[in-house]
Image (cartoon, rainbow, N blue to C red):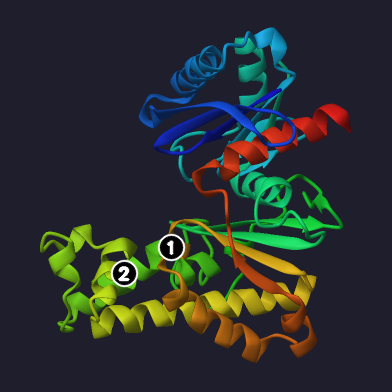
């Protein structure tokens, strides 16, 4: 049995599961992100204790802990260098802090890579050997599975697909670059474009879904307007989908995967987003490589990261 933790900027999800992915219990709590690393680690420890209690287990029955966190980290050292969801965190020894707190071996992994492992072992990718998992959300993250193994790179930072350059003259990214994929194809990008067009005076019902306030416009409000037939909302979703497709074409040409799994909140838009993405990917990728790549939606939902952390801990214990 393993503990899997998915640490986000607003939530902590802890699960107890076996190596086969069967969950015995889960605990969901808020992240005190503004209070710093020590407070967050304490919140994780309390969540872990509750999860064990709910399963009727003691910590002695847990073989290891896997923790998934957004950001740049090194799985070998267990250090989280920086995280977009945790302002002010720099070079935090997350693994060691958890190990001291619970007295159980801990292993740190990027959250998108964890979700890739979760889908590979327990979700949509169970029958694939070579796949790419993409989370389309506030930003864009990813995980790459090659011949059944997670590709981590030289320092554990591989898979930052959201930061490949799509437009050299594109919008500024939080990473400091310009024109990254996530500046053009994420939920944040969709909301930004909607706000820009509304400020220019475009006719739309988007504001009716955001209490009339432009500051409350999100990808979800754009989608809601699109479902009612709003022309601008549909146009913006199609534009975002086209940028999704450009990134997909790049990944297909580089990795020639048999499967690409799409997850994250933006993926809930469904075919309205993915049909134009597929059109552009088909047009731009090598024909044989595009035919070989099945594009599917993720299956595990919010549990993907925590279950992937369980899989990662199992791998590390047994490697």
Where is residue 78? Give x, y as percent. Answer: 70, 30
Secondary structure state at the residue bearing disc 1:
helix
Left or right relative to 155: residue 3 = left
Q: Quadrant of residue 147?
A: bottom right
Left or right relative to 19: residue 73 = left
| Mark 1 residue crowding within 10 angstroms, few (<14) / some (14–19) / many (20+) | some
* 224 up-or-down from 74: above or below: below
| Mark 2 residue crowding within 10 angstroms, few (<14) / some (14–19) / many (20+) | many
At x 77%, y 31%, the residue is 314
At x 63%, y 8%, the residue is 58
Left or right relative to 218: residue 261 = right
Residue occupied by mark 2: 223
**What whole-number distance in Å separates the C-alpha atoms at marks 2 and 1?**
9 Å
* 33 up-or-down from 177: above or below: above
At x 68%, y 36%, the residue is 21
Residue occupied by mark 1: 268
Q: Quadrant of residue 102?
A: top right
Task: State the residue in front, 173 or 311.
Answer: 311
At x 43%, y 39%, the residue is 9
Where is residue 2? Give x, y as percent. Answer: 69, 24
* Visible residue check, residue 93: no
Where is residue 138? Give x, y as percent. Answer: 43, 56
Of the 4 image quadrants, the one containing the N terminus is top right
* Visible residue check, residue 129: yes
Q: Please identify the residue farthest to the left as the structure is shown.
A: 212
Pointers 2 and 1 in contact (C-beta within 8 Å):
yes
Lower sequence index among marks 2 and 1: 2
Secondary structure state at the residue bearing disc 2:
helix
């Amino acid at each position: 049995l393993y503990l899997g933790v998915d640490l986000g900027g607003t939530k902590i999800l802890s699960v107890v599961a076996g190596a086969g992915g069967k969950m015995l219990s889960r605990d969901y709590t808020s992240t005190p992100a503004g209070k710093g690393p020590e407070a967050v680690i304490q919140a994780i420890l309390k969540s872990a204790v509750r999860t064990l209690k709910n399963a009727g287990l003691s910590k002695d029955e847990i073989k290891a802990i896997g923790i998934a966190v957004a950001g740049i980290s090194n799985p070998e050292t267990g250090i989280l260098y920086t995280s977009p969801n945790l302002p002010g965190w720099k070079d935090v020894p997350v693994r060691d802090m958890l190990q001291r707190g619970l007295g159980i071996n801990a292993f740190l992994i990027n959250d998108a890579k964890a979700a890739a492992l979760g889908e590979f072992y327990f979700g949509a990718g169970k029958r694939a050997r070579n796949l790419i998992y993409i989370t389309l959300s506030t930003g864009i993250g990813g995980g790459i599975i090659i011949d059944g193994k997670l590709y981590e790179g030289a320092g554990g930072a591989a898979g930052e697909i959201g930061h490949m350059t799509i437009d050299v003259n594109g919008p500024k990214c939080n990473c400091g670059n310009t024109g990254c994929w996530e500046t053009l194809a994420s939920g944040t990008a969709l909301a930004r474009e909607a706000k820009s067009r509304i400020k220019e005076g475009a006719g739309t019902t988007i504001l009716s879904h955001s209490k009339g306030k432009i500051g409350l416009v999100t990808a979800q409000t754009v989608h809601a307007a699109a479902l009612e037939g709003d022309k601008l909302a549909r146009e913006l979703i199609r534009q975002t989908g086209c940028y999704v497709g450009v990134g997909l074409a790049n990944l297909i040409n580089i990795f020639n995967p048999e499967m690409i799994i799409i997850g994250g909140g933006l993926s809930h838009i469904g075919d309205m987003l993915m049909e134009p993405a597929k059109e552009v990917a088909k047009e731009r990728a090598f024909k044989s490589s595009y035919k070989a790549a099945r594009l599917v939606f993720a299956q595990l939902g919010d549990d993907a990261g925590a279950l992937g952390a369980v899989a990662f801990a199992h791998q590390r214990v047994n490697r």
